[in-house]
């Protein structure tokens, strides 16, 4: 196992589960004057269901990430026969970010795992996150483990997984070859297939019992990121 030098992590639903998003959204809906009388649970359900045509527009670059975020709000509001303008949506989105990020908790065992991994490997994050990944990492208590330069954010780089260049950006930064790298994440397409196509090994975090959609062969499949301790820190 020691032949690997660099571990690259996905962020959302790999290191950080989406509870913060759900809690922050319900708090926001209950608080903002425009939405406080709406059914927050139903709003959350509509917000979490992103129509495929919106995702396609993001993938095809017809939407910027900011436009995509707004379109998701508009889509949810549409179910309540509401059409708030961009200014109000931006205001609600800002409130949501404040409330959501304040719901992000530190997980001591995850912090310890990453510190332990950091003594043997270089570590980085490669994320398509729509909301500031560095703030998330800070709230998770992981800023020392993942200094700013080691967080490769799709939005900043104008790329998105599975764009090949996004996987190469950290390799260039660290001066490490793809075959010396393990990518760890929950998305088969983005974190397993994309990483393997870039010459890396991959560990799939399959929390929901998903079925692979291609014939790629990951180094390992685990159900929780903490299961990688035995895979990556056992040098016997
Ligand atoms: Mg993910």
Image: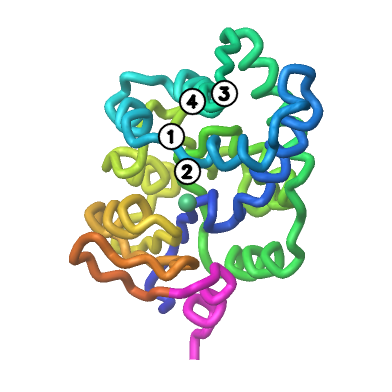
Say the numbered circle drawn on residue 127. 2
Residue underneath mark 3: 77
Q: Residue 59, how many percent across, how many down? A: 31, 31
Residue at the front extreme, as displayed: 81
User: Is residue 160 shown left or right of residue 185?
Assistant: left
Q: Earlier in the sequence, mark 1 or mark 2?
A: 2
* Distance between mark 3 and mark 4 Cα atoms: 6 Å
Residue 219 sits in quarter: bottom left
Disc 2 residue lies near ligand 1 with CB under 8 A = yes
Residue underneath mark 1: 154
Tell me whether the residue at label 3 lies in contact with that at label 4, contact meaning CB atoms closer than 8 angstroms: yes
Report the mark closest to the observer, 3 or 1: 3
Q: Residue 17, how many percent across, how many down? A: 61, 55
Tell me whether the residue at label 1 lies in contact with that at label 4, contact meaning CB atoms closer than 8 angstroms: no
Question: Element at badge 3?
Answer: helix
Q: Earlier in the sequence, mark 3 or mark 1?
A: 3
Residue underneath mark 4: 75
* Distance between mark 2 and mark 3 Cα atoms: 27 Å
Crowding around mark 4 (Cα neighbors within 10 Å: few <14, some 14 to 19, many 20+) is: some
The magenta region covers 222-236
* Distance between mark 3 and mark 1 Cα atoms: 27 Å
* Distance between mark 1 and mark 4 Cα atoms: 23 Å
Crowding around mark 1 (Cα neighbors within 10 Å: few <14, some 14 to 19, many 20+) is: some
The N terminus appears in which quarter of the rendering? bottom left
Whether 51 is drawn above or below 178: the answer is: above
Tell me whether the residue at label 1 lies in contact with that at label 2, contact meaning CB atoms closer than 8 angstroms: yes
* Distance between mark 4 and mark 2 Cα atoms: 24 Å
Report the residue at 35% width, 42% height from top.
161
């Amino acid at each position: 196992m020691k032949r690997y030098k660099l571990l690259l992590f996905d962020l959302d639903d790999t290191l950080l589960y989406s509870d913060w998003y759900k809690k922050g959204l319900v708090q926001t809906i209950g608080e903002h004057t425009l939405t406080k009388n709406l059914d927050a649970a139903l709003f959350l359900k509509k917000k979490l269901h992103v129509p495929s045509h919106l995702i396609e527009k993001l993938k095809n670059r017809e939407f910027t990430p900011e436009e995509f975020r707004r379109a998701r709000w508009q889509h949810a509001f549409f179910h309540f026969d509401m059409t708030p303008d961009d200014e109000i949506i931006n205001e609600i989105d800002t409130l949501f970010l404040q409330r959501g990020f304040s719901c992000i908790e530190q997980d001591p065992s995850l912090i310890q795992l990453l510190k332990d991994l950091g003594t043997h490997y270089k570590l980085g994050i490669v994320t398509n996150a729509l909301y500031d990944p560095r703030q998330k990492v800070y709230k998770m208590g992981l800023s020392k483990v993942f200094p700013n330069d080691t967080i490769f954010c799709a939005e900043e780089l104008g790329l998105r997984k599975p764009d090949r260049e996004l996987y190469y950006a950290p390799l260039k930064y660290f001066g490490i070859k793809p075959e010396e790298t393990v990518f760890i994440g929950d998305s088969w397409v983005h974190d397993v297939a994309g990483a393997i196509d870039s010459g890396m090994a991959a560990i799939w975090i399959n929390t929901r019992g998903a079925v692979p959609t291609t014939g790629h062969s990951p180094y390992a499949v685990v159900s929780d990121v903490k299961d990688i301790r035995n895979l990556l820190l056992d040098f016997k």
